[in-house]
């Protein structure tokens, strides 16, 4: 009977390993948490709310990218590694549910912020335990893990203290928790060493999956913002514009960035992939995810504006500065992230995306005074123009040669 309860040993990934259905489900839970941030931020879009959403996204993203590294070493759907990832999925699902009440003001309950801190502890402990488990015989990696405990403990202390004190101090302490854990981990990886990337195609695919899932999840903001007014033609037009924007962002990443970047990563010798993987994927991809989430916030607010006074203002009242910033700043951030991603991988990026990002930001004062539907249409037209330009006049594979 003993063999029935014996855990299967970790199975190392091969260079040709592909993402498994289990990993897709894992990524879906994280994307659900991302879009929950957008949903509750759109309900009261203020500058403080945008900062809060940024801090939460950073904390969530740092967990995801650590597990992307872990499951590039061994299969995620086998033995104790699968069990640990299942625990993490459950923890992140709980975190997503309590995210709207993460920030304490005055006499607000400690339950939600403390739950998030507990989730953070569980996710980090499982990661460290699984990494220790799969690193048997790798003295360098285990030495790195011993040091990693230090920034994790300090970041947990900052999270706990922030949850207790609340207010602006919570924002600063939780942001500091991310910086301590992230920068501390990266410094230890540089000094002592970090696991390599035995399967660059799998690593690139995992990050592509989280981008496409986030784009798909962002369309939920259309339904949330439209509510029961989806049959009105101005709302239908706004919904279609939101879909076109998602398609444009999809095209810009998957048609002209993901494949050549993945090929470039595969050409790097295995011992040198860590640096490119850490910067181009683990860090820069956060800009893509944050851009998608901020765009989702803007879309939801646009649709909400269009349903408030449908007879007097069928195209929606002009957006406030915060909502306009989210609607226009999201795509601009996405384009900047994509440009950096291409620069770090294929070593070239055309000036057009940067120019378009600058144009989008420059149009913020104009968009602030437009009806909500017109502002949404304006940024959609700009993205369509960029896609058309790149489809006709630029191919990153040629630039990478």
Image: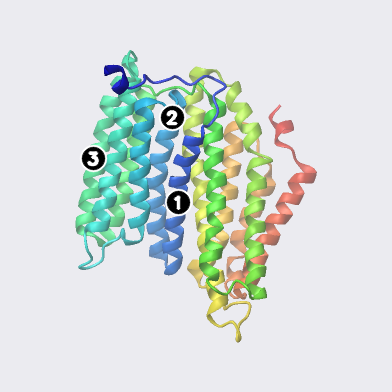
Q: Name the residue under label 3.
A: 154
User: On screen, 228 above or below 216?
Assistant: below
Q: What element carries label 1?
A: helix
Q: For the image shown, how many numbered marks are present on the structure? A: 3
Residue 257 location, x and y as percent? 64, 38
* The residue positioned farthest toward the top in the image shown: 137
Q: How crowded is mark 1: few (under 14 residues within 10 Å), some or many (20 or more)?
A: some
Q: Mark 1 points at which residue?
A: 32
Residue 236 location, x and y as percent? 65, 69
Return the mark for residue 122.
none
User: On screen, 296 above or below 209?
Assistant: below
Residue 339 location, x and y as percent? 60, 43
Return the disc, 2 or 3, that comes first in the chain's sequence.
2
Relative horizontal placement of residue 316, taking residue 78 as reference (left or right): right
Residue at x-position 75% and y-position 41%? 394
Q: Can residue 197 be seen in this view?
A: yes
Relative horizontal placement of residue 174, taking residue 397 as reference (left or right): left
Return the mark for residue 77.
2
Q: What element carries label 2?
A: loop
Report the front residue among 358 and 268.
Answer: 268
Return the disc, 1 or 2, that comes first in the chain's sequence.
1
């Amino acid at each position: 009977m003993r063999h029935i309860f014996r855990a299967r040993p970790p199975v190392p990934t091969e260079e040709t390993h592909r993402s498994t259905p289990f990993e897709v489900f894992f990524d879906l839970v994280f994307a659900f948490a991302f879009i929950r941030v957008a949903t509750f931020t759109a309900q009261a879009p203020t500058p403080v709310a945008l900062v809060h959403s940024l801090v939460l996204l950073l904390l969530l993203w740092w967990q995801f990218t650590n597990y992307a590294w872990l499951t590039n070493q061994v299969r995620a759907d086998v033995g104790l590694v699968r069990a640990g990832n299942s625990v993490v999925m459950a923890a992140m699902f709980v975190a997503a549910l309590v995210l709207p009440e993460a920030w304490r003001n005055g006499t607000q309950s400690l339950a939600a912020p403390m739950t998030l801190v507990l989730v953070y502890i569980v996710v980090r402990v499982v990661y460290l335990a699984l990494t220790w488990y799969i690193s048997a015989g790798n003295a360098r990696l285990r030495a790195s893990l011993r040091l990693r405990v230090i920034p994790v403990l300090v970041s947990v202390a900052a999270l706990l203290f922030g949850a207790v004190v609340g207010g602006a101090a919570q924002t600063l302490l939780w942001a500091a928790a991310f910086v301590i854990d992230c920068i501390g981990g990266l410094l230890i990886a540089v000094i002592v060493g970090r696991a390599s990337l035995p399967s660059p195609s799998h690593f690139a695919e995992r990050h592509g999956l989280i981008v496409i899932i986030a784009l798909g999840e962002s369309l939920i903001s259309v339904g949330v913002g439209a509510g029961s007014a989806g049959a009105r033609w101005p709302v239908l037009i706004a919904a279609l514009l939101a879909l076109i924007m998602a398609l444009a962002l999809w095209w810009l990443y998957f048609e002209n960035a993901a494949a050549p970047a993945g090929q470039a990563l595969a050409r790097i010798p295995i011992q040198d992939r860590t640096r490119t993987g850490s910067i181009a994927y683990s860090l820069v991809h956060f800009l893509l995810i944050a851009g998608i989430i901020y765009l989702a916030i803007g879309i939801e607010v646009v649709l909400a504006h269009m349903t408030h006074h449908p007879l007097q203002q069928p195209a929606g009242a002009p957006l406030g500065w915060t909502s306009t910033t989210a609607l226009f700043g999201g795509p601009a951030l996405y384009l900047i992230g994509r440009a950096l991603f291409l620069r770090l991988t294929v070593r070239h990026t055309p000036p057009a995306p940067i120019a378009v990002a600058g144009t989008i930001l420059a149009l913020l004062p104009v968009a602030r005074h437009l009806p909500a539907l017109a502002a949404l249409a304006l940024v959609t037209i700009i993205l369509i123009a960029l896609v058309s330009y790149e489809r006709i006049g630029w191919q990153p594979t040629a630039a990478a040669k």
